[in-house]
Amino acid sequence: MTPDFFTSLRRAGAGIALAILAGTAQADPMHGIAMYGDPALPPDFEHLPYANPDAPRGGRMVTGEVGGFDSLNPYILKGSVPWQLRFLTGESLMARSLDEPFTLYGLLAESIEVGPNREWVEFTLRPEARFSDGSPVTVEDVMWSYETLGTIGHPRYHGFWSSVASMEQTGDRSIRFTFDEANLELALLAGMRPVLQKAQWEGRDFTESGLDVIPITSSPYVITDVDAGRYIELTRNPEYWGDGVVPFTNGLYNLDTLRLEFFGDETAAFEAFKTGEVNFNREFNVAKWESQYDFPLIRRGDFVQAVLPHSRPSGITGFVMNTRRDVFADIRVRDAMLHAFNFEFINEAMTGGQQPRITSYFSNSPLAMQPGPAEDRVRALLAPFADSIPAEAIEGYALPVGDGTERNRPGIIRALDLMDQAGWTIDGDGVMRNARGDAFTFEILLEQGSSENQSIINMFVESLTRLGITATVTVVDGPQYKERSDSYDFDMTYIRRGLSLSPGNEQYLYWGAEAADDPGGRNLMGVQSEAIDAMIEALLTSDSQEDFLAATRALDRLLTSGRYVIPIYQWNISRIAHDKRLHYPDRMPIFGDWPGWQPDVWWWEDS
């Protein structure tokens, strides 16, 4: 992590906490808002520092996706929707800069105003704002969108809405939200909900999904061609309302066509890239990057490779254990799984040992838990929960390290000891059983198409046989996977949670107790911990950089030492290969390759 993170937080100077606590936060309409301090860009900024305002327009970007889809509405729970559509087809009142930890600038809204302690926030819409069909974006559209999404939309939108005490129109183009709790982040979250066209949904059931209704938004891209399960094509709207109006969008949305091509598995998608049918590819396997990118398009220079840095946390990627199931309710069993998972051997087999492991949820950033015992503010935050949290959360924790061999004898011995402590032993037939004679078995649910995950799991299953454990691997198609994961119908499955430099209310969605059992939620591990909820509350109400860092590091300790996920690789760089005619600015934002950067800042140039 570069010092840019701390620089951004320090821009407000030493008065950040005093400004918030003393009630002197901004009282006049502003062009942007930062979680702490002031936005880095002035009111008269012309474009984002990582955008090219002189970029030409035209060309196309084609990506290869694994799986399929049966819906084009990313704003509801029902249906299988390509994850990109939420970012490509939606616009909100404010837009997030990728070059600051958490700062928003006006998009549909021309200004934002907050109460002395951010107990309310008011937005004024731009008079030029238009939906893709040319109709104006109105306060009525905004109010309908927020209430609809907050009540019957995707559960990701419910948390914010539950904190809104009132929503009222305060002028022809103004709307105010008043909150029922002290939470500094809510004013920013209010600016990040998608705004949909109310008129489109009159007489229609918003909760029903399908391919026949495409939500109308104000986005620069509209879906223009669909072949069910095969591809989705989006076209830049030549009448996009924001062109020449919104400084934030200056230099963005340069490509004429964005196309998502869908394939049955990763191998087929890569073959399409090698032939040029796909012209943009992210590579997550370093061994493959170094050994399989020697094909004609690369050799001729028609396609190029790039390695790009970023300064965001690693997040968590790996295999999550569902603590709602008895098989993984005991932390000693989950710990045994971590010891049995032979990461060093797997990493050597999959990447030649070149891919570093995720060491905690916020690793690769200053927000990560520090080695050794908790100290100072972190220890003080954890101390009240000492009797109900893993001792290692305070004493210090690190992931187990195998010996690098296929048998991983030390790891297996430790796993056997942990299983014995949890009441499981191997009988005379070599089967792990409890005192009642029940065999220890569980199911690993995977989505069809991920050959790499299946290879990793196959090696893990082999290790488990040495413990007398039978793990059944079930591979299902996209819709079945979504249905089962939404209802938490699994023992273990794949998880990927990207985390930002400014964690906030989304942490409740990921690991909060209140929504842990809500269908379609993000808390796949099912954790319900008073201590975790308290750390999330602490980071949300922090009034200084020091308290914010302490709360996040304490949360990281709880999540990591709780042994809910078996982590695999971290990607602290992005490996991208693409058509040489696709370009991006040299200046990378601190978030790096992240939604809002690709395809947003890219352009097409033949020379």
Image (spheres, rainbow, N blue to C red):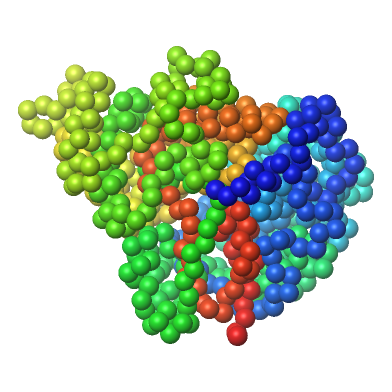
Residue 219 is at least partly visible in this image? no
Left or right: 31 as drawn, with respect to 599: right
Q: Residue at x 67, y 49 (%)?
A: 100
Residue 272 is at least partly visible in this image? yes
In x, y percent, where is residue 214? 64, 61
> Residue 34 falls in which quadrant of the image?
top right
In x, y percent, where is residue 552? 56, 33
> Residue 197 falls in which quadrant of the image?
bottom right
> Residue 539 falls in which quadrant of the image?
top right
Give whichever of 39, 29 is nearer the camera. Answer: 39
User: How many numbered marks are there?
Assistant: 0
Q: Is residue 169 above or below residue 539?
A: below
Give whichever of 315, 307 is nearer the camera. Answer: 307
Left or right: 339 as drawn, with respect to 235: left
Quadrant position of the C terminus in the picture:
bottom right
Q: Residue at x 34, y 65 (%)?
A: 288
Q: Residue at x 80, y 63 (%)?
A: 46
In x, y percent, where is residue 117? 80, 30
Give whichever of 164, 315 is nearer the camera. Answer: 315
Task: Looking at this view, name the residue that lies furthest to the left.
Answer: 428
Q: Residue at x 37, y 54 (%)?
A: 355
Give whichever of 491, 345 is nearer the camera. Answer: 345
Q: Is residue 227 above or below residue 332?
A: below
In x, y percent, where is residue 504? 63, 37
